[in-house]
Amino acid sequence: MPENEVKRQHYVPRTYLKHFATERSGEFFIKALPTADCREEKIIEMNISNVCLQKDFYTLPGDTAEERMLIEKFYSDNYEAHYNNIYEILIDPNKKTLSDEERELIISTVVTMFYRTTKWVNLHNEFFNRVLEQAYFMCQQTGKDYFMFEKQKISIAGKTLEELQKENKYKSRPAQILTQLQVAFRLIKLRTIRDGIYVSRLVDDNCEFITGDNPVVYSNINSGHVAPFDPTNILKLPLDNKHMLFLMPYSDKETKHLLLRHNVSGTMCFTEKLTSNYEQFRNSERFMLGSGSSLKGYLATKEISERPLTEEENLKMKSFGDLIQKGKDLGLF
């Protein structure tokens, strides 16, 4: 295997993770909390080289290392190599405006980070596993050893359902990775037209952001189902334990080059931290990541912040002031 052929491929860049990590002897270490078992004793320390990676995740079919490493090298050269520069721009309080190049690089980095994780591939595989399961048992009932899917003949001859699903997962991954990148390119083009860029900073010492293995969160102010590829979504990315980046739609020519900033303290600081960290919990597949203090801080408020209000409490929530008072009663503020 050529030296430049990378097998352990990170779907969350180490250049991003190191800003949540502690450096020791030139290595970066981060604390991880499994989403499946959110207890303080389950917090572990990991080298960022060993987190958010999958073997051959971006590797394409090909005869040469250059062909096989095309996607891995693309992400490395076009985004990861520039991330530290982006980070310094975004956290610099004196930076007020962005050039076209800076703005496009920030937007494209966030969008590709949104689409390059394992989540979308795993969702596709889960869906198609159900399709294969139904088709497999239908073939068994009708005595056929194949079925048609989108004009493609899929044979089940001599295969168990598990073998069929595993085979499909392996064969479809390169196409999935390329499709994710194509979707990202289309979204970058749309968002570059009008996105505004906004950075929020937590002022209070006891408030810290966490991140996770699927760090870009999307939401939409419109009600109803939110599609991940909708260019009107708000995209949020924690930059470190104190800074949050927002890509905001509907900017205009006069304001889209402004780098807007806001320092939050007091109740709003705590609320923003609480909201973002809960979003990271909901968005993460396996691990939430950050400092030991930030993860312990999340756990300290997890139970009370996620407990639904009783019917009686809902009836009493007649104003924003009532909501704030309830938060104080729960010890949140």
Image (cartoon, grey):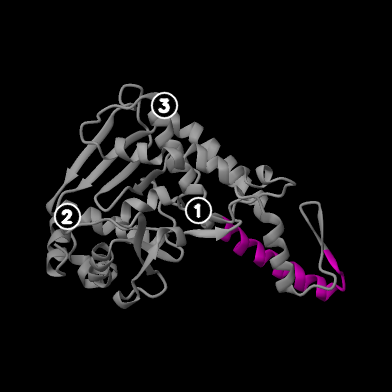
Q: Estimate the spatial distance between the alpha carbons at disc 1 and disc 3, rounded to whole Å.
A: 24 Å
Q: Residue at x 57, y 46 (%)?
A: 72
Residue lying furthest top in this view?
254
Kindly identify which residue carries mark 1: 11
- Pick whichever of labels 1 and 2 is earlier in the sequence: 1
Q: Residue at x 17, y 51 (%)?
A: 268
- Do callouts 1 and 3 mark residues in contact (Cβ within 8 Å)? no
Q: Amino acid at mark 2?
A: Phe
The answer to whether residue 218 is visible is no
Label 2 element class: helix
Task: Inspect the magenta stretch and tell me whether residue 136 lies in it.
Answer: yes
Task: Characterize the local packing of mark 2: few (<14), some (14-19) or many (20 or more) Cα atoms within 10 angstroms.
Answer: few
- Relative height, residue 61 to residue 132 (above, below): above
Closest to the camera, between mark 1 and mark 2, is: 1
Q: Is residue 2 magenta?
A: no
Name the chief secondary structure element in magenta: helix
Q: Judging from the image, what secondary structure is the residue with disc 1 in?
A: loop
Q: Residue furthest bottom?
A: 41
* Residue shown at the point (84%, 65%) measured from the top left: 146
Label 3 SS: helix
Mark nearer the N terminus (1 vs 3):
1
Residue 90: numbered disc: none
Judging by the rendered image, the residue that carries numbered circle 3 is 101
User: Would residue 160 appear left or right of 58 to someone viewing this image?
Assistant: right
Query: Where is the N terminus found, in terms of image quarters?
Result: bottom right
What x and y, as percent, mark residue 160?
A: 76, 75
Residue type at the position of mark 3: Glu
Q: Answer yes or no: do the residues labelled 1 and 2 have beta carbons within 8 Å?
A: no
- Residue 320 disc label: 2
Position in image of residue 81 (x %, y %): 45, 39
Residue 82 or residue 314, whichever sits in front:
82
Report whether residue 190 is seen: yes
